[in-house]
Structure formats: C-alpha cells, structure tokens
Image (cartoon, coloured by chain):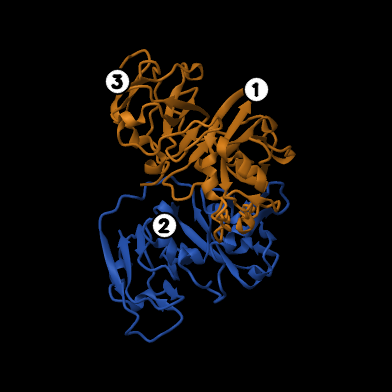
Chain colours: A orange, B blue
Amino acid sequence: MSATIQLVEHCKTLRLKIDKNVTYLPYLSELNGKYIKYIDVCDEVTEDEDGRQYVGFSDDLFLSLIEKDTNVIKYDNFSLENFCISKTRQNRLLLNFKVDMEQSFLQCNNTQKIGKYIYILVWYTDLGDVNKVTEGENGLYCANSFEVQLKEQKNFFPDNREIFGKKFLNFLLYAPDPQEEPIPPIPPIGNGGGETAVVSQNICPCSYPRTYNNNISIIKEQSKDLFITLVKNSTKIFDSVPLYLFLYDNVYNYLTFNKIEFDFTLSYVTIAKSRVDEIKQWKLAVMFNCIYED
Amino acid sequence: MIIENLYTLSYDLKSPLIYLSKDNYTEGMKVNRVLQFSEGDGLSKSFNLRPLCSKYDVNSLFLDFYYNNKKRNSKNIALPNLSKNSLINFYLDEDINFQISKIVNKKLQDKDILISLALDNDEAVDVMQWGSAKTMYINTEYIEKRDIYPLSLFNGAEFFAKKKVKRIISNFANGYITIKDKEGRNCQNMPLSLLMYNYKNEEIWLRDYEINIYESFITFNEEPQNFLLTFYY
C-alpha cells in the first residue's frame, strides 16, 4: 500500500505511571475539545529528562479509549502493541476523535510492570479530518539545516535567521551509525593490596560522523535519549518528542507537519537525565534538515 | 512511490558542481523525490564504472540545490537524508544546479555518488491495483557476455511487452535497468536495488508501463547467478 499522509499539528507527551491493574488516563487541559489523531508508544525510550524509567515493548498492556460526549467505547481493550513504534514503524492507526481521557484507561496484566512508566505521545489537531497539507502557491518546498549544540540538559535552538518564521513540513534528523566502534573504556586494574589504578575513560567519539558545521554529531542510538520541544507563544506545540522519531530509518511512514510555525529560539532539545554528563563531555551536536514552504 | 520517469546521475566527487540542463526534459514534469544510492544499496560501481561511495562515506557529504535566478535554494542537505520523504521537489524546466557543498574526506574525490530524480505528473491515480504477476528468469550464462543486455534477449520478454506493467521486483541489486515505454516515458539507469522487494520499506510502482523490450536493457556490475525479474501487470 502507498503511505498515507500523517498530518500533525500538536503533540502532548503523557508519562503514564502504571499504578495498578487498571490505570485511568489523566485529564489534560490541552486535549480538551481536540481531535486525537494518533497515539505513539515510544517503547524504545528508556529514560526521560527527570530520570523516570520506562518499560519497553509490551504485549500485556491494553488500552480502552472512550469518545468524549458520546461515551462510545471506540477502542475496547486494544493491545498497546498496536501503538508501539517498534512495531508500527510509524505507520500509525488514525483515531480522529475526541477522547474522554478520564474515562479511558490502561489495563495491565503483568504485576511486574506496576510502578513503571510508559512514554506516550498524543498527536492532536484543533479540527478533525485534516488529512492534506494546504498546498502553497506552487506546492514547492525548500530544505535547510540547523544544529543544536548539546552543552546542558536543556539546549535552545540557535539564532538562525534564514529559517525564522518559516512554515515547517518536517524535520529530518541526521544521526548516522558510527563507522567503527568507539574505543571502549579501559577497566580499572586491581592489585593484591586492594588499590586500583586510576585510568581515564578513553571513550573517544572520533569515529562519529561530523555535522555540516563540523561538530561531532550524535549517533543513531543516542537519538532515543534526546527530546525536542517546540514552543509557540509560551505553549508547547510539540512536547518532549523523542528525536528518533525524526530519523525515518526503516519506517513504513513518516510525519508531515501541517505547516507549523513556532518560536525558534524558545524551542529546545533536552537530554535524558543519566546521559547528560556523557553527552556534555563529548560536546555533541544535533543536526536537522528541515523542510518548509517556499 | 509511483514513478513516471526516472533519471540517474552519476556524480563525480572531484567536480564541484553538476548542472542539470533543462533541454533534456519535458516541460511541466515535476521531480517529487530525489534518491541517493551508495555501495550500501548492493551496488559496487556507478554506471561510469567508477567506485561508489560506501554508506559510511555518504554520512560525511552534504548537498546544496541552487535554482538559477531564483531565491529558492535548498542547502546543507545531509546525503543520508536525501532519499527520505520528499525533501526536495522542483519542476524540471527550471535551471537547477546541484553542488556537494562539503567533503571532509579527500579520498572520496576518487568516488562517485548516484542521485536519481523520480518524476511524476502530479495526477493522483491509484496504480496499485494489479491483476497478475509473472517471473522472468534471466540466465546470462548462455548468452554472449556483453556490457548491455536488451530485455528482448531473454525468454519471456515478448509476453511482458504486451502488458501494462505496474511493478517490477528484482532479486539482484548490483546493476541498473533502463526501461522505455511505448509512450516515450523512461527510467534511465534505475539501480536494481530500488526494485528489490520492500526497498527501504517502500513500494515502488510504475504507471502502466508498456515496455519497449528492444530499447530497454540491463547492465550488471557483476554477473548474477540466478537473476529473476517479477512483473506485476
């Protein structure tokens, strides 16, 4: 089948804690009155910016979604597997209805998962039935790039005047695999007296690819530990979306942004808590190619 | 992806610029996808017989597109991103320049990259309905070795010449196919890797090609042992 356009405008992240066998979804004011288009379970995210740990792929979790105002059970005990990105490969199930979050719930049949978190993305629009990008005058697009240097846990987009104020259709992440394995750390040497020699952790990303501006790029594996937030008028229009979604490697479909505009220098990339020191030490950068309307 | 026409360019990394002359192309035709191929796609040589960049070499290449006399340029496109999505689109009767804007590794100047321009005419026709599929076994062992193998040389080609072909699947990647149809459309030097089943999770379809088997041909980088082409029609 040819890929259908997956048009998106906003994304809210739900860091859902599995409290008990039945966990009701929280009320989210941003979703009030909005059409939920897609749900993604980012089952390859293991940790977020606050250090919460996430369960991986699960075939023992089931989601029930109730439609707002009608109370119709649109999805009844639907396996969460159908929303897991590792399985869907971004060929998303179109929902396109208003969800009553507080009546909708997650059922967990595995007590070992209670107390753990699931990383859920909720893609929504203000209007229903928006499935085609409104074409510009000639339907032609431009591509450009920008880079975000990773110096802190929260790293703002650069001041790039060329793409300020543009209407974006997509971001494509540049995060190739490294050509060779990085040099592994040398393990500490112990002697009979119980002392250990201090050796440096000689992990060198010198085999990592370089970005256009000759910074050391992140690699594919690290894209699961990084998150992007797009801000417009103090509102997060994309809230902590894992970067690996924009890699589009080995996927069946991809996102299309509905010509979204946002405040460039107020938007940012964040790093999973336990990865911050490692990434800061190597002074890595994230490079995106972006597509926008001509 | 639905392909109406396709043109492949072999780009020598010694040259700074490649110019796409509008004289060779039909007015109004729109390139909707620009694809990039490397050794990692199962190819070993470009059709100029020069070595191809590996999939790792490609990681350190960035491309600019300049539209002459117009402001709309696309810049700093990481080559691994080029084939994903409709990153670049343009009308072929514009004057276009491509430029590899940066090469970090000087050794790459001895290599080629391959770029294919996939065109359609913007009609939203659902071509994915097909009736039958049939496989043609191409045995080069009993044919005099040559650089170019016209499709007419192979048993079964006459059968497909009378059909409206919607899809071709190859089991071998290391070569190129040029397909011309009776209406004048053509896919020039299409890498066979694009026709491997589920190429990068994408289905590649043709729009009812009535293949001219005398003007369509295959070139191989290495001789295949068991080469099959399956035609959907």
User: Mark 1 highlights which residue?
Assistant: A233
Report the residue that reaches farthest toward the front. Answer: A193
Q: Position of residue A156 (x, y in %)?
A: 68, 34
Q: What is the number of the mark on residue A51?
A: none
Would you call the spot at circle 2 few (<14 residues within 10 Å), some (14-19), or many (20 or more)?
A: some
Q: Chain of mark 1?
A: A
Q: Is residue B118 above or below residue A115?
A: below
SS assignment at label 1 = loop
Q: Nearer the viewer, residue A100 or B141?
A: A100
Q: Are marks 3 and 2 on the same chain?
A: no
Q: Are marks 1 and 3 in contact (CB under 8 Å)?
A: no
CA gap, disc 2 and disc 1:
42 Å
Which quadrant of the view contains residue A63? Answer: top left
Q: Position of residue B14 (x, y in %)?
A: 68, 70
| Quadrant location of the C terminus of chain B in the rendered image | bottom left
Q: Chain of mark 2?
A: B
CA gap, disc 1 and disc 3:
35 Å
Q: Is residue A80 visible?
A: yes
Q: What is the number of the mark on residue A73?
A: 3
Q: Is residue A164 above or below residue A97?
A: below
SS assignment at label 3 = strand
Q: Is residue A205 above or below residue A271?
A: below
Q: Nearer the viewer, residue B21 or A196?
A: A196
Would you call the spot at circle 1 few (<14 residues within 10 Å), some (14-19), or many (20 or more)?
A: few
Which quadrant of the view contains residue A192? Answer: bottom right
Q: Are marks 2 and 1 on the same chain?
A: no
Q: Nearer the viewer, residue A27 or A183?
A: A183
Left or right, residue A82 beside residue A283: left
Amino acid on which the number 3 mark rests in the picture: Ile
Q: What is the number of the mark on residue B199?
A: 2
